[in-house]
Image: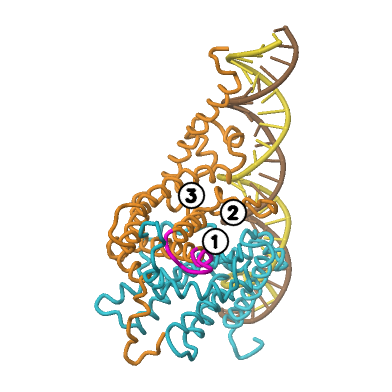
Chain colours: A orange, B cyan, C yellow, D brown
Amino acid sequence: MRTGTSQRDDQRQTAQQRRKELLEAADRVVLRDGPEASMNAIAAEAGITKPILYRHFGDKGGLYRALAKRHTDALLASLRAALDAPAADRRQRVEATLDTYLAAIEARPQVYRFLMHPADNGQQEQEQNFDVGHHSAPLLRRLGEELATVIAERVELGPGGDEVARVWGHGIVGMMHAAGDWWLRDRPCARAQLVHHLTDLLWGRLSLAEDRVGAPGF
Amino acid sequence: MRTGTSQRDDQRQTAQQRRKELLEAADRVVLRDGPEASMNAIAAEAGITKPILYRHFGDKGGLYRALAKRHTDALLASLRAALDAPAADRRQRVEATLDTYLAAIEARPQVYRFLMHPADNGQQEQEQNFDVGHHSAPLLRRLGEELATVIAERVELGPGGDEVARVWGHGIVGMMHAAGDWWLRDRPCARAQLVHHLTDLLWGRLSLAEDRVGAPGF
DNA sequence: AGACTGCTGTTACCGCAGGTAACAAGCACG
DNA sequence: CGTGCTTGTTACCTGCGGTAACAGCAGTCT
C-alpha cells in the first residue's frame, strides 16, 4: 500500500476522477458536434475506446443523464441565485429569472439543444421507481418541479395551493422554454424585450387588453 | 386508354391514394410502437418493402413531416373551432381551447408523443428558405405562430403589438405543452382543474397573490 | 408489331450507430 | 507465487437509415 487509505478507496477516487475527465471530454464533443455526438467520437476525444465509456456510464442514456445533470445543476444554481437576488418586488425577480435563463441558452446554444432534445427517452419499463426519480428527470420536468416548490413556498395561494403551484411551475417553465427556443432561432427582438413581453403575459395583460374592433372576443 | 383522363393524371391519382394508404399504415405502427417506429416496421405493416417508402417520402424525415402534417392539421382545426365557438368572454374561449388541446393529447398519447418528440431535426443546412417553411415546421412552432396571428388579429395590443402577439403565442403554446406533458404522465388532478389553474395563471393571478408570511417576495 | 416511358415492386447491399464479448496488462494483496 | 480488481484493447454482433440494381407491367408513340 502506498498510503494510509485502502486500495479500494484509492481506486474509487481515481475512478471518480476518471469519470469527471470523461464527462469533460464528452462535454467538449457535444459542444462541438451538437446532440448527435457519437460514442465513438466521445471516446476518441477522451483518448480511449468505447467499452470504457460503457463501463462507466452503462449506456448512452447514462452518459447523457450524467452530462445533463451537471449542466442542469449549474443552470438551476444560477436560476436560484436570480430568484433570491435582492429585488424590490416579485415582478423584478421574475424578470431577472427569465433573463438569466435566456442569457444561459443564448450563451451556449449547443448545450441547450443537447439538454432539451434528448432524442431518446429509453426509460419505458420501470414500475417501482417510487422515488419519482427526480434527479434523472429531463431538464424541463426538473425545472418545473423546482419552480413549483419555490412558488408554493413563497406565494400564498390558499387551499389547494400546492396543486396550483405545481401546475404553474410546469406551465411557466414551458412558456419560458418555448419562447426561448423560438427566440433563439428567429431572434425577432432583443432579449430584454422578450423578457418584458413574457412578464406582461404572466402579469395578466392578456386579460386586461381590449378586443380589437370588429373581432370576436378571443 | 381506359377513360377520358390521361395516363399521367390516372397515375398521379393512384400515387396519391397509395401515399394515403402508406400514411395510414405508418399511423397504425406509430400508434402501436411509439415514435421510434422503424421504416422496416412501417413498410411491413403496409405490406411492402422499404424502398417504396423512400420513393414516396424521400427519407424518414419526409415521412415524419407528412404524418405530422395530418395530425397537426386536424389538431389545429379543432383548436380553431374551440377558439371560434360562441362564448361569453375571452376567458371562456381560452379555457375551451386549453381543454380541447388537453383532451386531444389525453385521447391519443402515442400520437402526441410522436408529434412532440421528433427525435431528430435533420434540417441544418438550408439557407434560402425565405418562405420560412411554416407548413413543415414542427408542431410546437406552428401552433405558436398560429396562435400569434389569432392574438394579433383579435386583441388590441397597441404599437408593437405584433411582436407581443408572437411572443405570447409561443409562450402560451409552450405553457400548454409543458403543463400537458407533465399532467399526462403524473395525472395529478382532473383535466378541468388543470385548465382552471392555467387560465388563472394567464389571467394574472400570480401578480395578485400575496406573499407568504416569512418568505421573500418571489 | 416493337421500342420507350414511367410506375410498382423486389433483393441485396453499404455505412454507421449503439452495444458487447473476450482477452491482455498493471498493480496491490494473501 | 497466484488471486482479484481495475483499465484498456480488438473484434465482433445487431439493427437502423438509406441506396443501387434489377424485374415486371401498364399504356403510348412510331
Q: Element at badge 2?
A: loop
Mark 3–mark 1 Cα distance, whole angstroms, equals: 14 Å
Q: Could you tell me if residue B131 is visible in this image? A: no
Give the quadrant of residue B7: bottom right
Instruction: Give the position of the N terminus of chain A as an image quadrant.
Output: top right
Segment colored magenta: A154-165
Q: Which mark is residue B117?
A: 1
> Looking at this view, is A80 or A127 the one in front?
A80
Residue A203 image offset from top left, x and y in percent: 35, 71
Residue at x-position 53% and y-position 53%: A138
Q: Which mark is residue A121?
A: 2
The amino acid type of the residue labelled 2 equals Asn
Q: Residues within 10 Å of mark 2 (few under 14, many from 20)?
A: few
The amino acid type of the residue labelled 1 equals His
**Badges 3 and 2, same chain:** yes
Instruction: In the rendered view, tell whether residue A131 sits above or below residue B14.
Output: above
Give the quadrant of residue B56: bottom right
Q: Residue furthest front?
A: B213
Q: Please state the chain letter of the residue tagged with numbered disc 3 in the rendered image.
A: A
Q: Please state the chain letter of the residue tagged with numbered disc 1 in the rendered image.
A: B
Residue D30 image offset from top left, x and y in percent: 56, 79
Give the quadrant of residue B101: bottom right
> Looking at this view, is B71 or B181 the one in front?
B181
Mark 1–mark 2 Cα distance, whole angstroms, equals: 9 Å
The amino acid type of the residue labelled 3 equals Pro
Which residue is tagged 3? A35
